[in-house]
Image (spheres, rainbow, N blue to C red):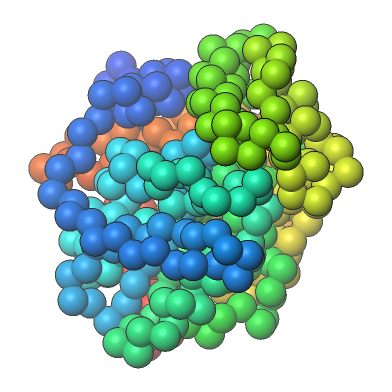
Amino acid sequence: MPLLDNSTYRPPLFLSNPHIQTILPSLFRKVRGVAYTRERIDTPDGDFIDLDWSRVGASRVAIVLHGLEGNSQRSYVLGMVKALNRMGWDAIALNFRGCSGEINRSARFYHSGDTEDLDRVISHVASFTVYREAALVGFSLGGNVVLKYLGERGQYAHSLIKGAVAFSVPCDLTAGALKIGSPGNKLYMRRFLKMLGEKIRLKAAMMPELISDRGFEQIKDFKQFDDRYTAPLHGFASAEDYWRRASSKPFLERISVPTLLVNAADDPFLAPECYPKAEAERSSSFFLEVPRFGGHVGFMAFNRQREYWSEARAAAFLNEQVSLLS
């Protein structure tokens, strides 16, 4: 039933092209006014997770998860944090392992299906008794983590979590990996591999007995990268095994917390399998909205608040869910 057919998103004049929506904010958007306080959480395996807090003295808090090779300083994270603060939420930008500006200690780093660290952060946040409600907001890879976490736990998701929103999520990782590896996305793939390669080189220097960057320049797509690094470092048999087990799509119908997924119809990274309409139609808690435009983590808007449509949409959805539960 929760298939939202009439999205309110309308792109600014002359900015409807999906590649403009995808590239322009990433390169040129500046978000000012967010002041973070960093907190480091140690993990049981001797590693750490860095959280960047933006507090306004609220009794509710949102945890924001970035995308592949993102971090808390990316404009889409800063914009979401700022909008949530304005709408009465404290916010935490979760930096995945190795994404906070300091390489993490262990051979593993992060991946699309890693929900254990998110669960650890939620439990940590729950220890702050000031918070009565919490929400999750994820982008792309981070959105897949959010959806998979909520689906895995179903009705046993942490009681503090009252709602969630995810944007631009390749919820079918196999289809998404093939889509972004297509010839039309060659520039994007090259950029992702360049960033991942820099991280692999750092890790290879730290632990040459476990990780090698020899021949990295021969890797041309996610299949080759995930076969060589993601799968063996995180306990998967192969790239295909990783994509199958880490995809959030099989878990969507088990989500019991009100959750909104927004995937633009023109997203250059998403294949048809990444628009889970049947799952939304069969669910009472999982909402799907497919704007005609928006690109990948785009949804640009011009207004006095300098907020993107995605930021206002997330805050409105979460406030509505919290009000319904109050």
The one of 24 and 202 positioned closer to us in this rendering: 202
In the figure, residue 70 lies in which quadrant? top left
Name the residue rendered at 46%, 22% in the picture. 18
Counting from the top left corner in percent of width and height, residue 95 is at 44, 52
Name the residue rendered at 67%, 34% in the picture. 208
In the figure, residue 115 lies in which quadrant? bottom right
| Viewer can see residue 324 | no
Whether residue 199 is situated above or below residue 80 in the rendered picture: above
The one of 8 and 136 positioned closer to us in this rendering: 136
Whether residue 191 is situated above or below residue 119 in the rendered picture: above
Counting from the top left corner in percent of width and height, residue 44 is at 60, 70
| Viewer can see residue 62 | yes
Whether residue 222 is situated above or below residue 134 in the rendered picture: above
Name the quadrant of the C terminus: bottom left
The one of 9 and 74 positioned closer to us in this rendering: 74
Counting from the top left corner in percent of width and height, residue 303 is at 16, 39
In the shown orientation, is residue 123 left or right of residue 80? right
Name the quadrant of the N terminus: bottom right
Counting from the top left corner in percent of width and height, residue 51 is at 38, 60
Count the labels in the image.
0
Name the residue rendered at 29%, 60% in the picture. 38
In the shown orientation, is residue 98 left or right of residue 107? left
Whether residue 139 is situated above or below residue 158 in the rendered picture: above
Name the residue rendered at 55%, 71% in the picture. 120
